[in-house]
Amino acid sequence: MTEDLSDLEDIPGTTVFTAQQSRKGYHLNQFCMSLMKADNRALFKADERAYLDTWGMTEAQIQAVLHRDYNAAIAEGGNIYFLSKIFSTDGKSYQQAVATMTGLTPEEYAAMMLAGGRSPEGQRSIRDGN
């Protein structure tokens, strides 16, 4: 039984973490979870590429991690809750990391969120032009 999830692709700027995304990002997300252990964080920090090469990730996933491009990592199946292990390893707050995903500084991001977030106008449907 295959469920039609095409409506989930109609949300501008949003990747919904579906079972398909979970399968796509399995190795990426497992790598992220490995960073919960201090020994693994030390291995990763010592030689990021060598450590990433042990996880069976695609080159696109590896490049997303190396460049700390969290939007690309999400497109490659990463889950933000797992990806948070990377920015925690880097000593970054959730606010600092997520701000990079929006093109805002951490201060601008915080101000935007405290003001109620982004307007939903123009963000509801690609297909319907809303």
Image (cartoon, helix red, strand yellow):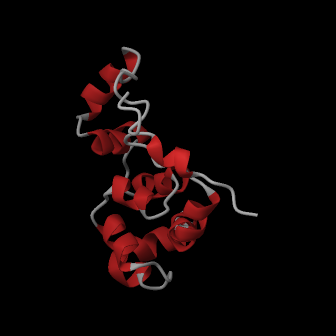
Badge count? 0
Q: Is residue 47 visible?
A: no
Compared with 50, 72 (above or below) is: above
Left or right: where does residue 81 sit relative to residue 1? Answer: left
Residue 61 image point, x, y percent:
39, 71
- Which residue is nearer to you in this view: 120 or 31? 120
Compared with 118, 2 (above or below) is: below
- Which residue is nearer to you in this view: 80 or 4? 4
User: Residue 103 sits in which quadrant?
Assistant: top left
Residue 77 image point, x, y percent:
49, 62
Compared with 60, 98 (above or below) is: above
The N terminus, quarter of image? bottom right
Residue 63 image point, x, y percent:
31, 71
Toward the top, the furthest residue is 115
Q: Is residue 50 visible?
A: yes
Q: Residue at x 53, y 69 (%)?
A: 24
Residue 27 image point, x, y percent:
54, 74
User: Residue 18 sits in which quadrant?
Assistant: bottom right
Q: Residue at x 37, y 54 (%)?
A: 70
Compared with 67, 110 (above or below) is: above
The C terminus, quarter of image? top left
Q: Residue at x 42, y 78 (%)?
A: 58
Toward the front, the furthest residue is 128
- Which residue is nearer to you in this view: 112 or 123? 123
